[in-house]
Amino acid sequence: MSFMINLSAASLALAVAFAAPVAAEVKIALDSATDLENSGTYVWAHAFSEYLNANGMEAVEYERGALGAEAEKMDQVQQGLLEVSLSDTKGVGALDGHIIPTTLPYLFPDWATVDRGLENGMLDKINAGTTPQGVRVIGMAALGSAAGIFNTKKPVKSAADMADLRMRALDENQIGVYKLWGTNGTIVAWDEVPNALQTGIADGYLNPPMVPLMFGHTGFIKYFTDAKVGLGSRTIIVSEDWYQGLSEEEQKIVMDAAAAATKANREWLATRSAELDKLREAGIEVTTLTPEAWNEFRTLSEPLHNMVPLPEGALDAWKTASGM
């Protein structure tokens, strides 16, 4: 009798262990400094982790680079070794091109337009391509205000001023933008940008206004043109294996956390009116384009929309879903 009681107790304990496993740590790979004032992506990540922790899922933030570079993080997410990563949007686009239009210059006027498109079916289209490859997209974080032109040499007031500048490019698509503007680009990994700018390998880059302040580039970046080229973003991906291993309740917590984080990021974005003043305070000369000059950059850039390889109908799908 005693043996049977002990056996039953052991069986019950084993059953409970399988029914209610101890929650594992949810690793979040950051892409920037833990700066709630200046980093829009950290605003997203921190709100996400706070929501998870408040709802019984232990989330831990890992600083930029601690879990590897972009390709390494993507591999870890696909293998189920890393739960959450704030990743390069164009890297996610290599898995499914429906997300690539969000990176094109002078296409989306604001984040409200992007959000409307995501909510009206584009997030589902993206995930239809990425989830079979082990990656689920749960949100997009704004880096800051619309991207402009930074350089080390001179004020840029028109496309003609770009002719003698060699710009750092993220990829071939960005090189295509520079060619349309009448200049050249060279692909440089982000961690190598400071050296490239100081040695003349590159003379500048495209990024939202706060980037040189966040990454300590103000010692060599001297000029910024508020060209409002496009919306800088990072895409938040999670391991599909991990996500599918969660209970329905936990999946809901993750998606509610993503919604809360996106709301926090967009509220932070609405406060960015002082960004140009902060650049000036850091010694960077700011140029505001005339309407004619801005329209010139936009017109020169538009052919790229039809040059970048995309899934058939992706551009039209975005325009319909976002109401453009």
Image: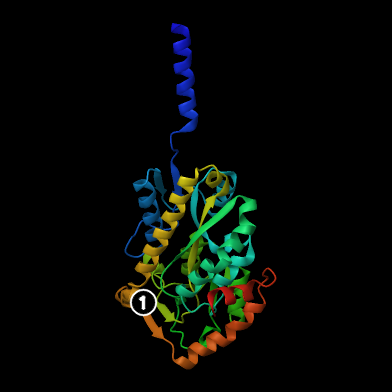
> Residue furthest toward the bottom?
292
Q: Quadrant of residue 296?
A: bottom right
- Estimate the x, y position of residue 2 in percent, counting from the top left: 43, 7
Of the pair 289 and 244, the residue shown nearer to us: 244
Of the pair 296 and 78, the residue shown nearer to us: 78
Image quadrant containing the N terminus: top left
Q: Going 45% across and 79% down the picture, which residue do you hit?
A: 153
> Residue furthest toward the right?
312
How many discs appear?
A: 1
From where the camera sits, is residue 71 visible?
Answer: no
Question: What is the secondary structure assignment of the residue under circle 1?
Answer: loop
Location of residue 64 with respect to 14 vertically, above or below: below
Task: Classify mark 1: residues with Cα within 10 Å, few (<14), some (14-19) or many (20+).
Answer: many
Three-letter amino acid code at disc 1?
Ile
Q: Quadrant of residue 258?
A: bottom left
- Estimate the x, y position of residue 263 in percent, counting from the top left: 39, 64
> Residue furthest toward the front?
1
Location of residue 189 with respect to 134 vertically, above or below: below
Image quadrant containing the C terminus: bottom right
- Estimate the x, y position of residue 230 in percent, counting from the top left: 50, 76
- Residue 173 as seen in the image, left or right of residue 246: right
- Estimate the x, y position of residue 91 in percent, counting from the top left: 58, 60
Q: Going 39% across and 59% down the picture, which residue do you hit?
A: 260
Which residue is identified by label 1? Answer: 284
